Image (tube, rainbow, N blue to C red):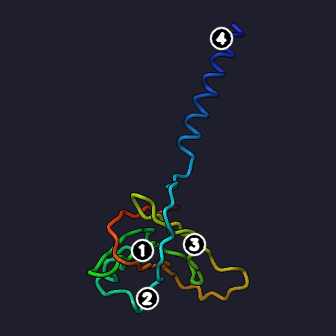
Amino acid sequence: MKKRFLSVLLLLTLLCDIFCLGGCAKEKPVEKEKSVDYTVVPEEDIPEDLREIIEPRKEVPFQLTFSDQSYLYIVKGYGEQATGGYNIVVNDFYQTKDSLYLDTELFGPSADDTVDGRISYPYIVLKIELIDLPVTFAH
């Protein structure tokens, strides 16, 4: 009986390890070929067509790509926030053999920041030379 209990316990432990390791790992393309040069587009320079796509989506987290004849625009939005003062940082942006990989992070206002209390919709727009690869968004 004790052997059977230990066998079942061992099996459950192995199954738990398999599911936790397989389901909890953060997927990140591993073969970084090169960093991607990009420009953060100020709000006033966002193409009007892209603005019209962003506007109805900005209340909830979103991610999208948009291209014109020359550039690829990559947009990551973080949805509605209770105040202003948020910053978005690009942690990593690189190209693999099969895709572009973008890792961004939202930082809230610090205790020292003066915020106006108005609702905000932080998002970032990156512009790169036109390239025909899918984009993988982290976070």
Q: Which label sits on residue 75?
A: 1
Q: Secondary structure at mark 3?
A: strand
In this rendered view, identify the residue nearer to me: 37 or 27: 37
Q: Are marks 1 and 3 in contact (CB under 8 Å)?
A: no
Give the answer, above or below, for where 49 lies relative to 6.
below
Q: Horizontally, is 59 left or right of 70 in the view?
A: right
Identify the residue at the far bottom of this view. 44
Image quadrant occupied by the N terminus: top right
Residue under pointer 2: 43
In the image as oriented, which residue stretches furthest toward the top? 1
User: x%, y% of residue 70?
Assistant: 30, 81
User: Label 4 to label 2, Cα distance in Å?
Assistant: 65 Å
Q: Amino acid at mark 3?
A: Leu
First in residue order: circle 3 vs circle 2: 2
Q: Which residue is mark 3?
A: 106
- x 50%, y 56%: residue: 31
Please say if 79 is above or below 83: above
Mark nearer the N terminus (4 vs 2)? 4
Residue shown at the point (60%, 32%) measured from the top left: 16
In the picture of the structure, the residue carrying the numbered disc 4 is 4
> Which badge, 1 or 2, comes first in the chain's sequence?
2
Q: Position of residue 131 (x, y in %)?
A: 34, 71
Q: Name which quarter of the figure residue 136 lies in.
A: bottom left
Alpha carbons under labels 1 and 3: distance apart: 13 Å
Q: Is label 4 in contact with label 3 (beta carbons under 8 Å)?
A: no
> Looking at numbered disc 4 in the image, what kind of residue is underneath it?
Arg
Q: Gap between marks 1 and 2, in whole Å?
A: 12 Å
- For mark 4, give the secondary structure: helix
